[in-house]
Amino acid sequence: MMKDLILSIDQGTTGTTVVILDGQLNVLAKKNNEFPQYYPQPGWVEHDPEEIWQSTTRTISEALDFAGVDANRIAGIGITNQRETTVIWNRQHSRPIHKAIVWQDRRTASLCEKIKKSGKERMVKAKTGLVCDPYFSGTKIKWLLDHIAGAGQEAKEGKLAFGTIDTYLVWKLTGGTSHVTDVSNASRTLLMDLKNLQWDEDLLELLNVPPQLLPEILPSSHVYGTTQGVTGLPDGIPIAGMAGDQQAALFGQACFGVGEAKCTYGTGSFLLMNIGTKPILSKSGLVTTVAWKLGNKVNYALEGSSFIAGAAVQWLRDGLKIINSSSEIEGLAQTVSDNGGVYFVPALAGLGAPHWNPHARGMICGLTRGTTRGHIARATLEGIAFQQMEILSAMEKDSDRKLKALKVDGGASTNNLMMQFQADILGTRIVRPKMIETTALGAAFLAGLAVGIWKDQEEIRSSWKEDKSFEPTSSKKQREDLKKKWGEVVGKA
């Protein structure tokens, strides 16, 4: 039977999406299943890894049923994932020792402050390109080893395995035979040297992480293992592509050239710029990350992360209950001509780049008796966009490049009102592709390259198609006034 399809798993923060597509990018199926979020204390966010695995196998089965295709046609599986979310499990029976600590979780803020006060932060940034923030995996690993009875000793004895969600899924898909990660996910742990792409002894010592706990670091397009004992899938399918969700989106947007950039609007929002084959350490509050590794060639990226984007809209729906579904927000925001002086800083899980303030909290200001639900809805969309304005300004400063266009994707990129406002405050053209599920697409491309569905990046670039672009309509003075007002507001969060 011809093996001509790619199955792409996009394991996100709130749900798992599976896309099945062919070499011409015809999407045969796209299915999604959400799974529970757990908030045991303020600032803590957890997932149950076994619920993530159940959502993955269920979504794979539903996608195959919807496509009506024989699973034996699958040439390879690509995985993209919420990145810094941390799982530790027992190697013998594969059961997690604790719920996964999610990337949004803030519980290690005091540990990060301790590292900063010790004077080690400069060493950490020089080696990893990252800042000391609870966002990244390393301090989450230390918390688990310190707080779960017996975990520290079992880790030293080689009885436990750590992984971000990509590693955990490969372990499960291969029946526990492959304990691996790719360079893009490894670069988010605070434990990998950005230049030699290996786990670093100084960083492991700083966080007291035994090396035997860690997965092998491999390229982003590579056969990591094959399926074994997975419900609904035959044994022997190569797991062949892997990248963190934002790097996968950069690849899926065909941002292969230096200076090309994309922004993904998901639960959080993430702006990445391809900076080529040499890392640039940010002086403006961004992080440097591995974009991908193909063969022996590595590409790096500058990244700015906002922890809350689509999650702010979900909060309006679930917390304030001013909308019944997330899709209603654009219509509600259009009931007013402007924000009415209302500003919303969506720091519901602290502030990410370029501020890196885990203690910041969300704020709505400028309320009057004339404020309506529409003003709050509009301020929410604008708050999401304002965060990207700060990040892009820092990115252009670090890279010494003026961005000509910003490619966008993710669920909120379908919001035309927000995309036009984004273009206006950036003064930059916004370009939306026909396929906005670019995280899944990037993982599919990486897997397809490894198993021969696509021959090279140029073939991939030629398949990328634009859906709509948004040209800036604001004057420079209008942009500067908005930037000044936002700076005043965000400083109070």
Image: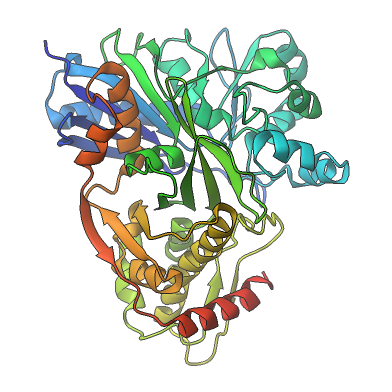
Give the residue drawn at x 62%, y 32%: 189
Give the residue drawn at x 54%, y 90%: 368
Give the residue drawn at x 23%, y 44%: 464
Frontmost residue, 425 versus 61: 425
Across and down, in percent, residue 444 comes to: 30, 30
Residue 401 visible in the current orientation: yes
Frontmost residue, 456 versus 425: 456
Across and down, in percent, residue 429 comes to: 34, 65
Quadrant where the image shows the C terminus: bottom right
Residue 382 appears in which quarter of the rendering? Answer: bottom left
Q: Is residue 428 above or below residue 467?
A: below
Residue 265 visible in the current orientation: no
Q: How is the model colour-coded?
A: rainbow
Across and down, in percent, residue 363 comes to: 61, 71
Give the residue drawn at x 58%, y 22%: 96
Q: Is residue 416 above or below residue 135?
A: below
Across and down, in percent, residue 480 comes to: 53, 80
Most distant residue in the front direction: 400
Q: In this view, does 469 lie to the left or right of 125?
A: left
Residue 21 appears in which quarter of the rendering? Answer: top left
Quadrant where the image shows the N terminus: top left
